[in-house]
Image (spheres, rainbow, N blue to C red):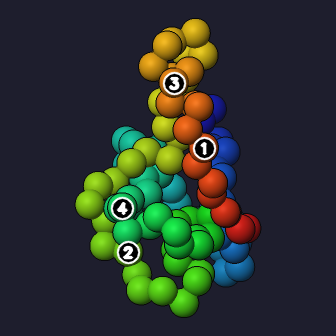
Amino acid sequence: MNGSDVLVQLFESSTGINLSNSKVRFLGRSMELGVSEDMLGRVFDGLGNPIDEGPQILPDARMDINGLPMNPAAEAIRRSLSRRVYLRLTA
């Protein structure tokens, strides 16, 4: 944000957005994704919507999509990175 100018990242199509009539409202937090262990083994789009013909996910928690910064020198992080997690994301 710079004065009255705002840079906005779109997570979906911009079809139908009229810039001269659009308004932005800040919520005071980053975008969040509803998460649950039911997500394991499923396929999602970039917004976390199931695209594998399975049921909708009922989230147990909401997490900031930005995550936390990692300290690669921390022993706990090195241990956790030794476990492999495979994710398939589509755009």
Measure the alpha-carbon separation of dots 3 and 2. Answer: 29 Å
Residue at 58% over, 49% down: 85
Amino acid at pointer 4: Glu
Q: Position of residue 45 (x, y in %)?
A: 62, 70
Q: Distance between the residues labelled 3 and 4?
A: 21 Å
What residue is rendered at 47% in x and 64% in y?
40
Q: Check the image and name the residue furthest to the left.
A: 60
Q: Residues within 10 Å of mark 3 (few under 14, many from 20)?
A: few
Mark 4 surroundings within 10 Å by alpha-carbon count, few (fewer than 14), some (14 through 19), many (20 or more): few
* Residue bearing the label numbered 2: 57
Estimate the spatial distance between the alpha carbons at disc 2 and disc 1, rounded to whole Å. 23 Å
Q: Is residue 58 above or below residue 83?
A: below
Q: Is mark 2 on a helix, strand or loop?
A: loop
> Which x, y percent locates residue 84?
60, 43
In the depicted view, which residue is nearer to us: 15 or 6? 15
- Which tag is nearer the camera, tag 1 or tag 4? 1
Which residue is labeled 3 in the image? 79
- Looking at the picture, which amino acid does disc 1 mark? Arg
